[in-house]
Image (cartoon, rainbow, N blue to C red):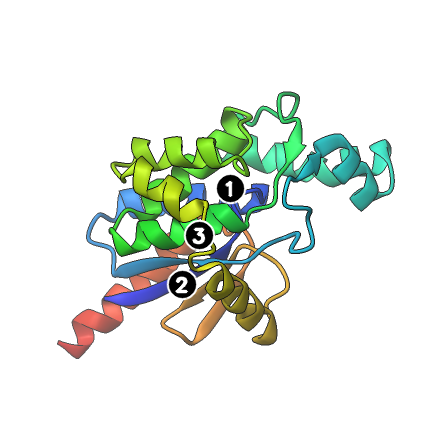
Amino acid sequence: MVKLDIMSDPICPWCYIGKTNLDHALEQLPDHPFTIEWHPFQLNPTMPTEGMGRREYLEGKFGGKDGAVRAYAPVVQAAETAGLKIDFEGMQRTPNTINAHRLIHWAGIEQRQSFVVQRLFEAYFRDARDIGDVEVLADIADSCEMDAGVVSKLLASDADLDDMQKRDQHSRDMGINSVPTFIIANQHAVPGAQPTEMWLKVMGEIMEQIEAAE
């Protein structure tokens, strides 16, 4: 198996699109060579703990309403191409995602990571839920067959908080400054929401190399 490390943030639309394109490729190659692990990277590490209004956030980041509309036009097009419906109108808040990253980490311990990542994306982009809310995160954990009670207690503590921040900083120290970023076999960094065809090509080449080595 070949390790595929993914640096991502569950409020990043390109990360959602990138995962969807990758998933389409994995579905077409059920015997794919990848072992996947998700890693924390906060788009907004200085976001207030309680988050902030989404309109305020976007207009501040992109220099007003028109700038936000222009910035998100490619996102809307890419999401439609990937077959995703994103409720941009319903999304009211931009959350701090450190607790979501803690949940993803704990899900990895239980071999539920990809399920939780998917549900976080769906909750935020499709269902317009606030994934900075600990009750929402506990509900997502429950929907992925994790113990919501345990998750709630962990979220009420500082468990693994420092570790998430250090791992985020480690990625930045490696030179990663945008997500999604995919790292194949600890060697090749692939930035951005790559199309399904690219992943099919990469996996095909890897499988050929594995077969030739056997």
* Dot 1: element: helix
The mark lying in front, picked from 2 and 3, is: 3
Q: Which one is nearer the viewer's eye here, 5 or 56?
A: 56
The answer to which of marks 2 and 3 sits earlier in the sequence is: 2
Residue 120 placed where, x, y %?
Answer: 45, 38
Amino acid marked by disc 3: Arg
Residue 155 placed where, x, y %?
Answer: 44, 46
Q: Callout 2 environment at 10 Å: few (<14), some (14 to 19), or many (20+)?
A: some
Q: Which residue in the structure is indicated by mark 1?
A: 17
Disc 2 + disc 3, Cβ < 8 Å: no
Please give left or right for residue 34 compared with residue 19 in the image.
left
Q: Residue at x 34, y 37 (%)?
A: 141
Q: Which residue in the structure is indicated by mark 3?
A: 102
Please give left or right for residue 131 compared with residue 108 in the image.
right
Residue 34 placed where, x, y %?
Answer: 29, 60
The mark lying in front, picked from 2 and 1, is: 2
The mark lying in front, picked from 1 and 3, is: 3
Amino acid marked by disc 1: Ile
Q: Which residue in the structure is indicated by mark 2?
A: 5
Q: Which one is nearer the viewer's eye here, 166 or 214?
A: 166
Please give left or right for residue 52 compared with residue 118 in the image.
right
Amino acid marked by disc 2: Asp
